[in-house]
Image (tube, rainbow, N blue to C red):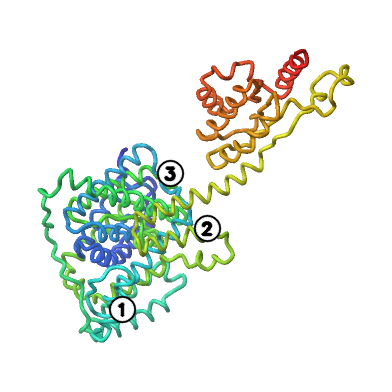
């Protein structure tokens, strides 16, 4: 997969350069509070977030994946690191394994399939993350370091320690909250409220509320990584969080890329983007940084005209300047301001539109969303995704079952319809030795059991069964196995079973493989209904002659 690094793409002009520089400058400044906040949240510290911003901006410039695609430190990674890693060594193991998995996804062409997770599961998971982020920042917002994790422990701690709150931090966050509420509309698209809150909050903290706790020291030094701790056993232990990072980080990026495409008017390349994300995850964690996805800084970048590698390199220079030349200014940022930016982000992550729509929507969607959200908050990330996926599978199967069964037809065919009218007087007018079964367009695991239960009784009532599969376009292994079992059941009792229609190639191959060609001679496959009727007519005549 070739890099897409081109400093000056074809047709690049002054307007493009202006957009890259302005977009890169604003995105770089915007990424600083998020890098610091996510770094602290992950347990790796603010420097990890800044390292991540630098490495990911460089990776975005070199690998790309779409116009205006900028990768920066992300919430989902920091939350997973906070829950599963207790040291930098463990974080590196998770990141390297996750990045390798993302590269494999890209190599296998699976990038675009990662986003095929139902919206109800996504809404529940992201809303749960938003709730966790919201409560994790309350301690910093009122001026004390919180040691608790989880909603209930944080609430208990805040109640116990509210009397020891920092008045400057609390006053500062209330003022900044008012600014955030006022700063909205079209202007907030280009100058996001996080940037305005950062500037206003830092100025107020420097000149008036200087008693509020500040951002921890940013020491631009190489992290102390114990390479001896990286072992095969460690990589085995972190498989679960690594897969979570690979899937959820890719998911967040690919969904964000769709929003970027709407602004830039281009189409991102899912597999290239997934490859670049995986490469960035490996490199970033290897140097002690925090991996990322498409986040708030990415949207600021593209809304202000950032499109090419020049814009990404501008972001890199801004962040490098922040941790070197401007380190003193960065360390004057009140921690409460960072906490407020995180709280506003958390509030925006909660899918309020989905929650407000619950009374009007189908109960199964609401149940899936709420169950995923509650599992995310109170159980764990892996469990939440697993529960959401299982619930979706079960609920979708119920809906598919009803839809597939509605297309199933099973009716008797009177003998007098199939046989010559010349012998009608000697024949029972209501005799029906032949039954016609018309299979639905889809026969899957969702309906296979119910179809089998319904048709076994019908098959027992007839000597000849015509099974019309000409309309069946989709069949899975469960559906094919069910049909094969019905055919075997009929043939074991001496019945004639005729399969009708030019089955879809995969359907025909699967059925013949399951039947091993010994239980269904070729004469039992008819090209159309008329041919099947002719086979049934011949069998009826043989029955009459006995």
Contact (Cβ within 8 Å) of mark 1 with mark 2: no
Tag of residue 365:
2
**Measured from the top left, where is residue 437 in percent x and y?**
68, 32
Mark 3–mark 1 distance (CA, rounded to whole Å): 42 Å
Q: Earlier in the sequence, mark 3 or mark 1?
A: 3
- Residue 400's tag is none
* Residue 432 as seen in the image, left or right of residue 30: right
> In the image, which is nearer the foreground, mark 3 or mark 2?
2
**Which numbered disc covers residue 113?**
3
Q: Tell me where residue 153 sits by quadrant.
A: bottom left
Q: How packed is label 1: few (under 14 Cα within 10 Å), some, or many (20 or more)?
A: some
Q: Who is closer to the viewer here, 534 or 433? A: 433
Residue 57 visible: no
Q: Nearer the viewer, residue 190 or 542?
A: 542
To which residue does mark 1 refer?
A: 200
Q: Is residue 110 above or below residue 517?
A: below
Please state if 388 lies on the left or on the right of 150 as rendered: right
- Residue drawn 29% across and 49% down? 240
Q: CA distance from mark 1 to mark 2?
A: 42 Å
Measured along the vertical axis of the image, is residue 525 above or below residue 453? Answer: above
> Residue at coordinates 28% horizontally, 49% vertically from top-left?
242
Disc with the residue nearer the chain's start (1 vs 2): 1
Q: Position of residue 478 (x, y in %)?
A: 51, 35
Under tag 1, what secondary structure? helix
Which residue is painted at 19% across and 59% down in the image? 86
Between label 1 and label 2, give the one nearer the viewer.
Answer: 2
Which image quadrant: the N terminus? top left
């Amino acid at each position: 997969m070739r890099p897409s690094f081109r400093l000056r793409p074809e047709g690049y002009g002054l307007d493009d350069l202006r957009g890259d520089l302005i977009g890169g400058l604003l995105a770089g400044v915007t990424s600083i509070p998020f890098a610091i906040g996510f770094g602290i949240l992950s347990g790796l510290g603010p420097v990890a977030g800044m390292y991540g911003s630098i490495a990911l901006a460089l990776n975005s410039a070199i690998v790309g994946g779409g116009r205006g695609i900028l990768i920066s430190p992300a919430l989902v990674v920091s939350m997973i690191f906070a829950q599963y890693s207790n040291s930098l060594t463990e974080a590196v193991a998770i990141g390297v394994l996750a990045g390798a998995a993302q590269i494999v996804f890209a190599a296998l062409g699976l990038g675009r399939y990662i986003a095929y997770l139902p919206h109800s599961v996504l809404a529940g998971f992201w809303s749960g993350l938003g709730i966790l982020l919201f409560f994790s920042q309350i301690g910093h917002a009122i001026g004390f370091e919180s040691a608790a994790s989880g909603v209930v422990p944080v609430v208990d701690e805040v109640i116990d320690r509210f009397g020891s709150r920092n008045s400057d931090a609390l006053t500062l966050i209330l003022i900044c909250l008012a600014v955030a509420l006022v700063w909205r509309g079209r202007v907030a698209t280009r100058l996001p409220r996080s940037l305005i809150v950062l500037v206003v909050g830092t100025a107020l903290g420097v000149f008036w509320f200087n008693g509020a706790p500040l951002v921890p020291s940013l020491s631009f030094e190489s992290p102390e990584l114990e390479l001896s701790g990286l072992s095969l056993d460690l990589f085995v232990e972190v498989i679960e969080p690594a897969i979570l990072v690979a899937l959820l980080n890719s998911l967040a990026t690919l969904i964000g890329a769709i929003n970027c495409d709407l602004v830039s008017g281009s189409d991102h390349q899912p597999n290239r983007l997934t490859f670049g994300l995986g490469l960035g995850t490996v490199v970033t964690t290897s140097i002690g940084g925090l991996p990322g996805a498409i986040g708030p800084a990415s949207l600021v970048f593209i809304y202000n005209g950032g499109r090419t590698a020049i814009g990404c390199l501008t972001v890199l220079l801004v962040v490098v300047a922040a941790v070197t030349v401007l380190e003193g200014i960065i360390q004057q940022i009140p921690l409460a301001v960072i906490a407020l930016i995180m709280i506003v982000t958390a509030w925006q992550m909660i899918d309020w539109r989905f929650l407000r729509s619950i009374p009007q929507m189908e109960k199964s969607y609401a149940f899936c969303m709420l169950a995923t959200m509650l599992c995310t908050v109170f159980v764990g990330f892996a469990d939440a995704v697993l529960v959401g996926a299982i619930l979706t599978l079960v609920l979708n199967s119920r809906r598919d079952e009803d839809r597939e069964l509605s297309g199933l037809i099973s009716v008797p065919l009177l003998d007098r319809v199939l046989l010559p009218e010349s012998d009608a007087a000697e024949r029972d007018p209501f005799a029906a030795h032949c039954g016609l079964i018309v299979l639905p367009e889809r026969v899957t695991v969702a309906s296979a059991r119910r179809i089998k239960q319904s048709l076994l009784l019908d098959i027992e009532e007839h000597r000849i069964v015509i099974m019309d599969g000409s309309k069946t376009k989709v069949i899975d292994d469960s559906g094919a196995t069910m049909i094969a079992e019905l055919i075997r059941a009929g043939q074991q009792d001496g019945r004639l079973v005729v399969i009708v229609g030019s089955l879809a190639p995969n359907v025909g191959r699967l059925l013949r493989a399951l039947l091993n060609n010994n239980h269904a001679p070729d004469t039992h496959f008819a090209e159309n209904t008329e041919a099947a009727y002719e086979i049934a007519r011949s069998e009826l005549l043989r029955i009459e002659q006995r």
